[in-house]
Image (spheres, rainbow, N blue to C red):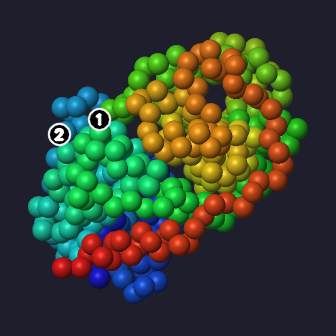
Amino acid sequence: MKFWFDADNSPHVLVMEPLAAELKARGHTVVFTARRRAATCALMDLYGLDYSLVGEGQQSGFIHKAAGTLRRAAALARHMRRSGGADLSFGHGSRALPVASFLLGIPSVTMYDYEWVNPAIFNLFCKSILLPEAVGREACKSAGLKLSKVVPFPGFKEQLYLDSVDTSREIAEDLGLRESSVRILLRPPAVTAHYHNPEAEDIMETVLECISRADSVQLIMFPRGSERLPESFAQGPVEVIIPEKMYNGPSLVRACDMVIGGGGTITREAALLGVPSYSFFRGREGSVDAFLEKSGSLVILRNSEDVEEKLKTVKRKTVLPEPPCSRQLVRCIADCLETAAQP
């Protein structure tokens, strides 16, 4: 069978790479399309994945996002019609993919782990919607998901790839990270996302002010746009490092003492790897983050007072536990895709 994977954003690449490898090992063909958004293409290149570039850019505002989705759906449909179609398409929350697949008569499966996205396109055009078991039936119902299409899977999407080759030592050397420093990885909030809450930007300012007062800190920052550091950083003791190239995400997390993010995959990767993880995501709280917070592996900073009280800029323990990756989960998702591809 022929599977069509669409990488619409950076985290999708890490999810799809082991699934594509598993399907190929079973004798199937996997083709990729990708959108030039954030670090998506850089990660596709880093992992050596062949892909066709279809669409680029990131729109803000509902009307512009909707128009962009329709334009990309039409472009995807044209591309795959020329490429001979597929037996099944698979995306991780890509909205253009199910629409394009519908136009071509190709069944489509989506997978995501934050239930409070608008599910209308997925309810209409997807054959199956894969969600972590942590997102229970009641949460799915409250989020407006069509329950007959929801297929729960055990664990978390990050467990598909957290056992990737550990290059943290090489990354530390490349970035000049010192064992004697507190190495903090910071990811700002996604201000153009539909779920963004401006409160996150205020909390990030407090986070940066708190870090600026600490000693022996190296701050590794991956800006999403034109974020600026406070003036206190100009004279302060913090060394700011902005990487000039793309790295394996889990290995970068392992190279750090703590991770602070405006939500998303990187804070969950850290939580599952045993690296102290702090999230100041202020959109509607998702079930996965709630589960990780309850387990004690993720600290959620809900306001500036939480930052002052909970954020600890200290060295983490040297030895991390084995990554909780499950080959069984890779096989489980691959089984779901094979089943959905059947006529």
User: What amino acid is at disc 2?
Assistant: Ala
**Above or below for 56 versus 80:** above
State the residue position of label 1: 59
Mark 2 is surrounded, within 10 Å at the Cα level, by few (under 14), some (14 to 19) or many (20 or more) other residues, namely few
Which residue is located at x 16 percent, y 47 percent? Answer: 70
Instruction: Name the spot of residue 243 as percent of width and height, x first.
Output: 63, 41
The residue under the point 69% across, 13% down is 232
Residue sitting at 18 percent across and 62 percent down? 101
Left or right: where 195 falls relative to 305 = left
Find the residue positioned furthest to the front. Answer: 138
For the N terminus, the image quarter is bottom left
Say which element carries label 1.
loop
How many other residues sit within 10 Å of disc 1, few (<14), some (14-19) or many (≥20)?
some
Which residue is tagged 2? 67
Write down the quadrant of residue 193 in the picture.
top left
Residue 76 in sight in this render: no
Task: Give SS at disc 2.
Answer: helix
Does the rendering let one see residue 27?
A: yes
Q: Are marks 2 and 1 in contact (CB under 8 Å)?
A: yes
